[in-house]
Image (tube, grey):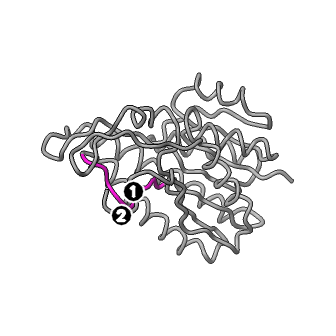
C-alpha cells in the first residue's frame, strides 16, 4: 500500500523538490500552498501520484478542510513535510513593522502548528496508528542572520514544537523530526549569490547547494519505521559561514 504524504509550501523551492522526489518513490503526495498555479507547476514535474490542495496554512478552517480531504480519500496520513515558510526584508527590531512580524509568525509558526495539529490527530486515530511529521527548521533555528528577528524567532520556536510533538507522540507511534537547511538553492536564496550581510557588517557571497540533497534527506526520514527517529538533521553548504564565528 502506497504511503500518503502532505507537503506544505509545495509550489516552489524545497517543497517542490521534495514533492518531486517523494512522488517518484511511489508515495501519494498532496501538494499544499497558497498559489494554485504554482502547485500545478509542481504537479506537472512530478512523475507519481499527486493531488493539488490550495490552502493558506495560516487559515485554521482551510487547514482543517485540507486534512479532512486526505482523511476522506485515504483514511490515513503517513508523512507530513511541514515546510511552508516566508521571510521579510532584513531590519533591526526597532525598524521592523509589526505587520511584517505578524505575517511571518502567521505562516512560519501558526501555520506549522495547525498542520502538525491536524496531522497528529489523524495519525493518532488511524489504523495502524502512527506516522511522521518532519518540520523545516532552518539553520536559523540555531543561529540568526542580521536583521532577521521574525524569521529567527519562529524557527527557534519550531525546534520547541518538534521536541514537544516528538515527546507527546511516543505513545501513538508518531515520530517528529526536524531538518535544518542551510543555503539550499531556491528562489529565496538567490540573493546569496550576490552577497548578503554578515555578522561582521560585511556583505559576502555565500555558497549554495542543490535542493536535491534536502529532498533525499526528507525521503530518508520519511522511509524510516516509526520506532526510529532522526530528531534533528542539518543539511547545509559545507563552506557557508555557519559553524564557528563568521
Callout 2: few (<14), some (14-19), or many (20+) C-alpha neighbours within 10 Å? few
Q: Residue at x 68, y 62 (%)?
A: 131
* 150 left or right of 137 in image: left
Q: Secondary structure at mark 2?
A: loop
Q: Main secondary structure of the magenta part?
A: loop
Whether residue 34 appears in magenta in the rendering, the answer is: no
Q: Is residue 85 above or below residue 156?
A: above
- Residue 53 tag number: none
Whether residue 143 appears in magenta in the rendering, the answer is: yes
Residue bounds of the magenta highlight? 137-146
Horizontal and vertical percent position of residue 156? 37, 60
Horizontal and vertical percent position of residue 53? 62, 34
The CA span between labels 2 and 1 is: 6 Å
Q: Residue at x 48, y 36 (%)?
A: 56
Horizontal and vertical percent position of residue 114? 48, 51
Q: Residue at x 45, y 63 (%)?
A: 161
Q: Secondary structure at mark 1?
A: loop
Pick the front one: 145 or 137: 145
Callout 1: few (<14), some (14-19), or many (20+) C-alpha neighbours within 10 Å? some
Q: Are marks 2 and 1 in contact (CB under 8 Å)?
A: yes
Horizontal and vertical percent position of residue 68? 64, 46
Residue to which mark 1 is pinned: 242
Q: Residue at x 15, y 40 (%)?
A: 95
- Would residue 53 be seen by someone viewing this image from the given angle? yes
Amino acid at each position: 500500500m502506497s504511503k500518503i504524504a502532505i507537503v506544505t509550501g509545495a509550489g516552489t523551492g524545497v517543497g517542490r523538490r521534495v514533492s518531486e522526489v517523494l512522488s517518484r518513490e511511489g508515495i501519494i503526495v498532496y501538494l499544499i500552498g497558497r498559489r494554485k498555479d504554482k502547485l500545478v507547476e509542481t504537479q506537472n514535474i512530478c512523475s507519481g501520484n499527486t493531488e493539488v490542495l490550495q490552502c493558506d496554512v495560516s487559515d485554521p478552517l482551510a487547514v482543517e478542510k485540507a486534512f479532512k480531504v486526505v482523511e476522506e480519500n485515504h483514511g490515513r496520513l503517513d508523512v507530513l513535510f511541514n515546510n511552508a515558510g516566508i521571510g521579510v526584508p532584513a531590519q533591526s527590531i526597532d525598524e521592523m513593522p509589526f505587520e511584517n512580524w505578524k505575517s511571518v509568525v502567521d505562516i512560519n509558526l501558526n501555520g506549522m502548528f495547525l498542520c502538525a495539529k491536524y496531522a497528529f490527530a489523524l495519525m493518532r486515530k488511524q489504523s495502524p496508528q502512527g506516522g511522521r511529521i518532519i518540520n523545516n527548521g532552518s539553520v536559523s533555528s540555531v543561529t540568526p542572520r542580521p536583521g532577521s528577528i521574525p524569521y529567527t524567532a519562529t524557527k527557534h520556536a519550531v525546534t520547541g514544537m518538534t521536541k514537544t510533538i516528538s515527546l507527546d507522540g511516543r505513545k501513538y507511534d508518531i515520530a517528529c523530526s526536524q531538518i535544518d537547511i542551510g543555503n539550499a538553492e531556491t528562489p529565496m536564496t538567490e540573493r546569496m549569490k550576490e552577497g548578503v550581510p554578515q555578522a561582521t557588517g560585511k556583505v559576502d557571497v555565500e555558497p549554495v547547494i542543490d535542493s536535491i540533497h534536502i529532498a533525499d534527506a526528507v525521503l530518508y526520514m520519511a522511509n524510516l519505521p516509526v520506532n526510529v527517529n532522526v530528531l534533528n538533521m542539518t543539511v547545509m553548504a559545507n563552506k557557508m559561514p555557519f559553524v564557528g564565528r563568521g
